[in-house]
Amino acid sequence: MRFLMTTKANGAAAPDEAVYAEMAKLVEEMTQAGVLLATGGLDPVGVHVTATDGTMTVTDGPFAEAKEAIVSFALIEARSQEEAIELSRRFWKVVGSGEGNIQQVFGPED
Protein backbone atom coordinates (compact mmCIF):
# COMPACT_ATOMS: atom_id res chain seq x y z
CA MET A 1 0.00 0.00 0.00
CA ARG A 2 1.16 3.51 -0.70
CA PHE A 3 0.72 6.37 1.74
CA LEU A 4 1.25 10.11 1.38
CA MET A 5 2.73 11.74 4.47
CA THR A 6 2.48 15.53 4.52
CA THR A 7 3.65 18.24 6.91
CA LYS A 8 2.22 21.70 7.51
CA ALA A 9 4.12 24.97 7.93
CA ASN A 10 2.73 25.85 11.39
CA GLY A 11 4.97 28.91 11.48
CA ALA A 12 7.94 26.82 12.62
CA ALA A 13 11.48 28.07 12.10
CA ALA A 14 13.58 26.46 9.38
CA PRO A 15 15.47 23.36 10.55
CA ASP A 16 19.15 23.74 11.41
CA GLU A 17 22.02 21.90 9.68
CA ALA A 18 21.99 19.07 12.24
CA VAL A 19 18.34 18.31 11.48
CA TYR A 20 19.04 18.40 7.73
CA ALA A 21 21.94 15.96 8.19
CA GLU A 22 19.86 13.58 10.30
CA MET A 23 16.98 13.79 7.83
CA ALA A 24 19.36 12.99 4.94
CA LYS A 25 20.41 9.80 6.78
CA LEU A 26 16.79 8.79 7.33
CA VAL A 27 15.87 9.49 3.69
CA GLU A 28 18.84 7.42 2.48
CA GLU A 29 17.96 4.53 4.82
CA MET A 30 14.28 4.53 3.81
CA THR A 31 15.17 4.79 0.10
CA GLN A 32 17.60 1.87 0.34
CA ALA A 33 14.93 -0.17 2.15
CA GLY A 34 12.50 0.53 -0.71
CA VAL A 35 9.86 2.20 1.45
CA LEU A 36 10.48 5.82 0.40
CA LEU A 37 9.24 6.35 -3.16
CA ALA A 38 9.44 10.16 -3.39
CA THR A 39 9.95 13.16 -1.13
CA GLY A 40 10.08 16.91 -1.53
CA GLY A 41 9.20 20.37 -0.37
CA LEU A 42 6.24 22.37 -1.63
CA ASP A 43 5.85 26.09 -2.24
CA PRO A 44 3.36 27.20 0.45
CA VAL A 45 1.96 29.94 -1.81
CA GLY A 46 0.80 27.92 -4.84
CA VAL A 47 -2.45 28.40 -6.73
CA HIS A 48 -5.98 27.15 -6.12
CA VAL A 49 -7.90 25.51 -8.96
CA THR A 50 -11.71 25.29 -9.15
CA ALA A 51 -13.51 23.51 -11.98
CA THR A 52 -17.22 23.83 -12.72
CA ASP A 53 -18.75 22.03 -15.68
CA GLY A 54 -15.38 21.87 -17.46
CA THR A 55 -14.48 25.53 -16.90
CA MET A 56 -11.43 26.06 -14.71
CA THR A 57 -10.68 29.07 -12.51
CA VAL A 58 -7.17 29.60 -11.09
CA THR A 59 -6.67 31.77 -8.00
CA ASP A 60 -3.18 32.85 -6.91
CA GLY A 61 -2.10 32.32 -3.29
CA PRO A 62 -1.21 32.94 -0.56
CA PHE A 63 -4.36 31.75 1.10
CA ALA A 64 -6.09 32.58 4.38
CA GLU A 65 -3.99 30.52 6.78
CA ALA A 66 -0.43 30.13 5.49
CA LYS A 67 0.41 28.03 8.57
CA GLU A 68 -2.09 25.44 7.29
CA ALA A 69 -0.24 25.08 3.97
CA ILE A 70 1.33 21.72 3.20
CA VAL A 71 5.06 22.37 2.80
CA SER A 72 6.56 18.90 2.38
CA PHE A 73 5.59 15.37 1.47
CA ALA A 74 6.86 11.81 1.39
CA LEU A 75 5.30 9.04 -0.67
CA ILE A 76 5.98 5.71 1.01
CA GLU A 77 5.28 2.02 0.49
CA ALA A 78 4.07 0.25 3.63
CA ARG A 79 2.28 -3.01 4.44
CA SER A 80 -0.34 -1.27 6.58
CA GLN A 81 -1.45 2.05 8.02
CA GLU A 82 0.23 1.05 11.28
CA GLU A 83 3.57 0.65 9.48
CA ALA A 84 3.06 4.04 7.80
CA ILE A 85 2.46 5.59 11.23
CA GLU A 86 5.64 3.97 12.53
CA LEU A 87 7.65 5.37 9.60
CA SER A 88 6.12 8.79 10.29
CA ARG A 89 7.12 8.44 13.94
CA ARG A 90 10.77 8.11 12.81
CA PHE A 91 10.43 11.32 10.76
CA TRP A 92 8.95 13.28 13.69
CA LYS A 93 11.68 12.00 16.00
CA VAL A 94 14.20 13.77 13.73
CA VAL A 95 12.14 16.92 13.13
CA GLY A 96 10.81 17.37 16.67
CA SER A 97 7.54 19.29 16.64
CA GLY A 98 4.98 19.83 13.94
CA GLU A 99 1.77 18.68 12.35
CA GLY A 100 0.92 16.58 9.33
CA ASN A 101 -1.27 13.91 7.81
CA ILE A 102 -0.97 10.35 6.54
CA GLN A 103 -3.35 9.30 3.78
CA GLN A 104 -3.50 6.09 1.78
CA VAL A 105 -2.95 6.60 -1.95
CA PHE A 106 -5.16 4.56 -4.26
CA GLY A 107 -4.27 3.66 -7.82
CA PRO A 108 -5.71 1.61 -10.68
CA GLU A 109 -4.66 -1.61 -8.99
CA ASP A 110 -6.65 -0.82 -5.82
Image: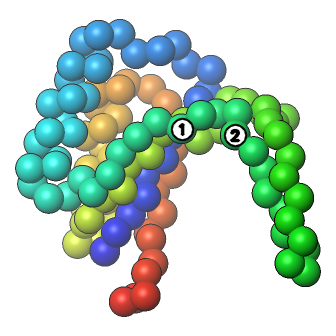
- Asked whether, in this view, residue 86 is left or right of residue 46, the answer is left
- Asked whether, in this view, residue 18 is left or right of residue 110, the answer is left
Camera-nearest residue between 54 and 4: 54
Mark 1 neighbour density, 10 Å: few (under 14) some (14–19) many (20 or more) = some
3 in relation to 47, above or below: below
Does dot 2 land on a helix, a strand or a loop? loop
Which corner quadrant holds the C terminus?
Answer: bottom left
- Asked whether, in this view, residue 49 is left or right of residue 108, the answer is right
Q: Residue at x 25, y 29 (%)?
A: 23
Residue at label 2? 46
Residue 104: name its quadrant: bottom left
How many numbered markers are drawn?
2
Does dot 1 land on a helix, a strand or a loop? loop
Q: Residue at x 84, y 52 (%)?
A: 58
Residue ranking furthest to the bottom: 109
Residue 76 is at least partly visible in this image: yes
Residue 68 is at least partly visible in this image: no
| Residue 71 image offset from top left, x and y in percent | 54, 36
- The Cα–Cα distance between marks 2 and 1, rounded to whole angstroms, is 8 Å
Tag 1: amino acid? Leu
56 in relation to 46, above or below: below
Q: Residue at x 41, y 40 (%)?
A: 40
- Asked whether, in this view, residue 101 is left or right of residue 64, the answer is left
Residue at label 1? 42
| Residue 109 image offset from top left, x and y in percent | 36, 89
Tag 2: amino acid? Gly
Residues tagged 2 and 1 counted as in contact (Cβ below 8 A): yes
